[in-house]
Amino acid sequence: MVDKGGPTDPKGLIFEAYRIDNIIKSDCRTIFLDWALSLPDGKDPIDSISILLKEYADMPLNHPMTRVLREGLERVGQPRRRGGWRSRQRK
């Protein structure tokens, strides 16, 4: 069983999200954003999300927070595009 708080979820946001009855995906996204913005500098979000998914592996796969965590893991790992047509105009 997962305890509230801890190094990966010190504010207990993810812990509480899994305990809210009838929580919806948009609420989970808001909680996830708050959790992500609370990560200490230098803390790898991919590692942290992976740890959370392992900690909550006993939760249903269709739980909205599990889906949001999986999406977060996929999106954080994707490279971001830098620059664009405006940055090329200034050269």
Image (cartoon, rainbow, N blue to C red):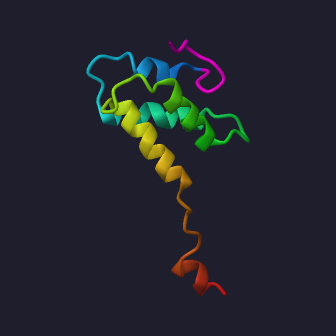
7 sits to left or right of 49: right
Depth check, front residue: 34 or 80: 80
| Residue 24 point in image, percent of width and height | 29, 30
Residue occupying the point 26% across, 21% down: 22
Is residue 62 highlighted in magenta? Answer: no
| Residue 79 point in image, percent of width and height | 56, 62
Task: Please tell me in which quadrant of the rendered image residue 27 appears.
Answer: top left
Is residue 4 highlighted in magenta? Answer: yes
29 sits to left or right of 36: left
The prevailing secondary structure element of the residues shown in magenta is loop
Task: Please tell me in which quadrant of the rendered image residue 23 appears.
Answer: top left
Depth check, front residue: 56 or 89: 56
Task: Please tell me in which quadrant of the rendered image residue 71 appears.
Answer: top left
Residue at the extreme left: 22
Residue occupying the point 44% across, 41% down: 70
10 sits to left or right of 20: right
Residue at the extreme right: 42
Depth check, front residue: 84 or 61: 61
* Count of numbered labels shown in the rendering: 0
Span highlighted in magenta in the image: 1-10
Q: Which quadrant would the C terminus be assigned to in this image? A: bottom right
Residue occupying the point 55% across, 37% down: 50
| Residue 35 point in image, percent of width and height | 54, 31
Residue occupying the point 58% across, 24% down: 9
| Residue 40 point in image, percent of width and height | 69, 34
Q: As displayed, is residue 18 above or below residue 71?
A: above
